[in-house]
Amino acid sequence: MIGKSMNTISSIRPTSSVVAVPLSRRNVVVAKAISKGAEVAAEGRSIRRSLNTTGRYTRKPVDDPKVQELMEEHGVGYSASGLVAQMRDNNMMWQQGEVNVKLAKAYGYCWGVERAVRMAYEAREAFPEAKLFVTNEIIHNPEVNKRLQEMDVAIVEDKGAGKDYSNIETGDVVIFPAFGATVQEMKLFRDKGVQMVDTTCPWVAKESTRSHCAEVKLFGDKGVQTTCPWVAKYSHEETVATASFAGDYVIVNNMEETNYVCQYILNGGNKEEFLDKFSKAISKGFDPDTMLERVGLANQTTMLKGDTQAIGKFLEGTMMKKYGPDKLNEHFIVMDTICDATQERQDALYEITENPGSIDLMIVVGGFNSSNTSHLQEIAEDKNIPSFWVDSAARIDVANNSLLHKMMYGELVETKDWLKPGPLRIGITSGASTPDKAVEEVLDRVFRIKDPSFAGIQPKECSPVILPTH
C-alpha cells in the first residue's frame, strides 16, 4: 500500500512552510581537499543530506501494480509478450523469413533507468492534481520523455539561457532525473517547499561515495591538496550534476587531453593556456600549478571502460615518473566508477561482434544524446562492421528502404538501400535508456522492408522477466 514509508512518493504531502535544517557532512565525487573547493564540496553534501529531513523528499519506488500495468501499456517497461520477450525465450535469436536476428545478451534498460521511469510514473499516480516537473529529460530516450509529457509532466530544459524554474511553486512536484540534480537545484527546491522525487541512479550516487571513501583510505586527514582528474563529457547531465558537489577537479574526455594534463604535471607549462583549454571542464579557482600534486581519478559511469583504463594507466605512469614508485600511493589513486550495466552491455557487444563475418550489420537503438549508446556504436564501428544507430523506428523509411542514423562522432547520415536483397544476418543491441518496445518497433520496420506482406509478431506468453539488479 502506498504511503507507509517516509521515503515513498505518497508519503510526501504539500506543506505551506519551508523546513529550515542544519547543514551536515556527506561524501562527494572527488577526493577531499583542504581548500576553497573542499568547502564547496562540504556544503553540497550538507544540502543533499538536509533533503531527508524535509518530509518532502523521496528516493525509493513503491512498485505500484497499477503503475506497472500503465508502463506496459505505454511500452516504457520490459517486454512481457512481444518480440524481445520471445527472443529471450529463444536464446536471444529470431528468424523471420530471410532475416536472422541476434540480440545481445545484455541490452536495453538497466535497473537504474527502469527505476527512474517507474518513480516518475508513480509520482504522477500519487499526485494526480499537482503540477509535475522534471529538471531534465528523465532518461535519454525520446519516446519515454514524450510519454511523460503526454501525462502533463513538464520537462525543464536548458535551451541556451539556463533553466527557468520561476513558475515552480510550493506544493508542486519536482522530479530529479536518473542523471541526478545539481546542488544548486536541490537547495532551490528545498527552500521553495516543493515535493522532491529523486530518481538519481544509485550508481551515479555511488560515484561520489566511492571517490571520497577511497581518498580517505589512502590520503586520510593529512591536510593535503587533492584533485580529481575526471574522465567524462563535461556537458553531460550526469557530469554537470556531480561536478556541482565537487571540490577541485579537471575533466578530460580523451587521451589527447590526458596527455596535455600529464605533460603539465611533468614539465609545467603555460597556465593561461591550460585554463583556457579546460575553461568549461575545471572547478572554480582551479590552479594547475598547485592542484595536480595529488590526484584521484574517477569517471562518468557511462564511459567506455577500455578508454578510461588506458587513461588511468597513463596518468599512473606520469605520477610514478614524477614522484617515484615508492611515493605513488601518496600521489595517485584510481576509482572505478563505470557502472556494471554499462560494462555488461559493452561486453555483450564485443561478444556478438567477436567474429565480424558472422553478421552482416549491426543495429544500435538508443537516444542520440545517450553516452552509453554512443560507445556501443563506437565498438561496432571500430570493428569495421556496418552499424546503424537510430533513436527510434521513426528514423526508418520502409517505403524507400532508407534510414537516418547517427555515427559515433555525431554525424547524422541518411543511408539508402541499407538492407540488401537476399538472406541477412543482423546483430542488434540497445542502450541502457532504451525500452524493449523501441527495439521491437525497429525490427518490425526491418521485417516490413524485407517482406511487404509481414503482418507483425503476435504476442505470446513468455517466461517472466528477470528484472536486473543493476
Image (cartoon, rainbow, N blue to C red):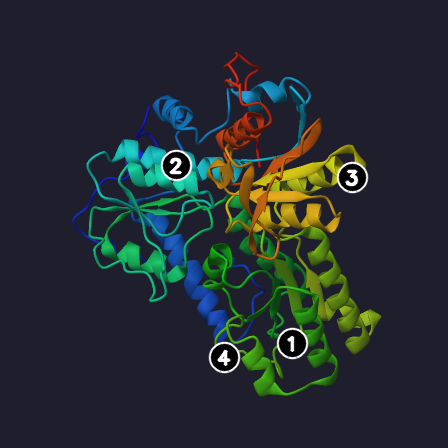
Mark 3 to mark 4: distance in Å?
49 Å
Instruction: Give the quadrant of residue 131.
Output: top left
Question: The N terminus appears in which quarter of the rendering?
Answer: top left
Distance from disc 1 to disc 4, alpha carbons, whole Å, reads: 13 Å
Decide: is 110 above or below 46. above
- Mark 3 / mark 1, whichever is N-terminal: 1
Q: Nearer the viewer, residue 83 or 235?
A: 83
Q: Nearer the viewer, mark 2 or mark 1?
A: 2
Residue that label 4 marks: 285
Side (left or right) of 284 relative to 417: left
Question: Comparing marks 3 and 1, which lies closer to the viewer?
Answer: 3
Residue underneath mark 1: 292
Proximity of marks 4 and 2: CB atoms separated by less than 8 Å: no
- The structure residue drawn at horizontal position 46% and vertical position 42%, both measured from the top left corner, is 141
> Residue at label 3?
356
Q: Which residue is mark 2?
A: 119
Instruction: Verify CB contact (< 8 Å) between mark 2 and mark 3.
Output: no
Given the image, on which type of amino acid does mark 1 rest? Leu
First in sequence, mark 2 or 1: give its number.
2
Tag in front: 3 or 4: 3
Q: Amino acid at mark 3?
A: Pro
Marks 2 and 1, how far apart at CA: 40 Å
Q: Going 51% across and 24% down the picture, which residue do you hit?
A: 79
Assess disc 2: are there few (<14), some (14-19) or many (≥20) residues with their C-alpha within 10 Å of its C-alpha: many
Identify which residue is drawn at 83% across, 70% down.
Answer: 325
